[in-house]
Image (tube, helix red, strand yellow):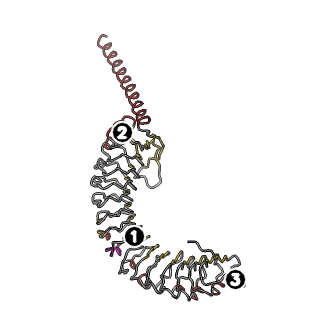
Amino acid sequence: MKSSARVIVMLFAIVAIVIILLVFSQKSKERARKTLVEDYAAEITEIEMPARDPEAGDGKEVRMIRQLVVGCSSEKLVDLREFGSLMAKVGQPTVLDLTGAPNLQSFQGVEQMSGLESLVAIDCPKLVSAEGVAGHTGLRELVFTDSQAFADASAVKGLPNLDTLDFSGCEALSGVDVSGLSGLKNLYLSRCRNLKVLNVGALSGLLQLYLDGCGGLETLEGLSHLTSLTDLDLSNASSLTQIDGVEELKSLIVLDIRNVALEDFSGIGKLPTLRVLRMGGQDSLETLEPFTHMESLREIHLEACANFRSLKGLPPNVSQYAGFTYCPKLTSLEGVEVATSLEQLDMTGCENLKDISALASLENLIQLSLVKCRQVTDISVIEGLDKLLIAMMGGSGVPPATTEDFEPANKDLILDFTISE
């Protein structure tokens, strides 16, 4: 009996201790939350998100789980050591948004938030280092956009689950080693003007690569390994003179090479899945013949190519949009007639364009721009285009008064003579 009584007393004692610990833990949690809210002006939000079973197939939700989303832009944040310690008592955040934190310098202490998946630090002017994130295996997204002093990305390693890396606008960044980020799908380095060399050879699963505005980038290595890449933006990467391996991008859908001074376009012409091609500032481009066999191409944007003189070689399957703007040596639309399914044609600023007779073949044309095409004086060729809805003529050589007797096949056709600068 005495033994049984002792057991019962011990059980009650254990229960009492557990209750005391729970109460203490709850009070500690409440104090930590109060400090975060009052001292750091942190915004702590609980949301419900669907948890998915990766083996059950796409779109099969198994349960709803509660997640913590935390935002903080306090001037007290220099690193995350104290903040992370307090946060660990409150709960494990999934998203931590430090956008605009004026004194944040590094992420030391972030390891205390082991459940963190997304770390955002947009426009943090004193952020200089990614210190603290190394080996944080839960991280799926790092976004440090427009943190202009950010220069040290060496800690971005050992992140096997990282899906998205965005350092856009980090102008002080001169290099980034992404070789250990094998799971990366999206890499955004737009406007990293001091970036000199980038090797992406280890990112075989990469889907999107944005290097637009990287004016100092001289070498892009490993491009041929990106066989899953769908979007590549190199616009205004003006120090690049070649893009070795581009012909191996068998999944590429969108390519932007505006103001990249290429001389050889043969690799681009071999891209089997490309649908959108944006070009501009290529002085060596004279015709569209390098792109003739691009059967998947639906849009072509070409602007300010000083020696571009002929539309011959236009792929016949271009149907959604064709723009050849501000090309001073282009005098004729001969060659466009093959694109019989074309819906939009933009010739804005082609000041020497005169012969537009080829328009007669574009029976599916819906929108036409001859803005600032001063040599175009007669538009009778478009009268028979019964699907044409708007023709923009501002600044062309067509006087509005001469169209008073214009009798288009489409009675709803609008002739717009306004000019927008």
Which residue is at 40% across, 81% downward? 283
Q: Is residue 174 above or below residue 385?
A: above
Circles 1 and 3 in contact, beta carbons < 8 Å: no
Mark before the other along the chain sequence, 2 or 3: 2
- Which numbered disc covers residue 83? 2
**In the image, 371: left or right of 249?**
right
Report the amino acid beneath label 3: Ala
Report the amino acid beneath label 2: Phe
Query: Percent x, y for residue 348?
Result: 54, 78
Quarter of the view holding residue 175: bottom left
Residue bounds of the magenta highlight: 240-247
Indicate the secondary structure of the residue bearing disc 3: helix
Report the amino acid beneath label 1: Asn
Indicate the secondary structure of the residue bearing disc 1: loop
Q: Is residue 72 above or below residue 294?
A: above
Separation (CA) of disc 1 from disc 3: 42 Å
Query: Percent x, y for residue 118?
Result: 39, 49
Give the class, few, some or many, for how many residues have Cα within 10 Å of label 2's Cα (few <14, many ≥20).
Answer: many
- Which numbered disc covers residue 401? 3
Which residue is at 46% across, 72% downward? 276
Separation (CA) of disc 1 from disc 2: 40 Å
Query: Percent x, y for residue 12?
Result: 36, 18
Which residue is disc 1 drawn over? 236
Farthest-out residue, top: 2
Give the class, few, some or many, for how many residues have Cα within 10 Å of label 3's Cα (few <14, many ≥20).
Answer: few
Mark before the other along the chain sequence, 1 or 2: 2
Which residue is at 27% across, 54% downward? 154
Quarter of the view holding residue 346: bottom right
Circles 2 and 3 in contact, beta carbons < 8 Å: no
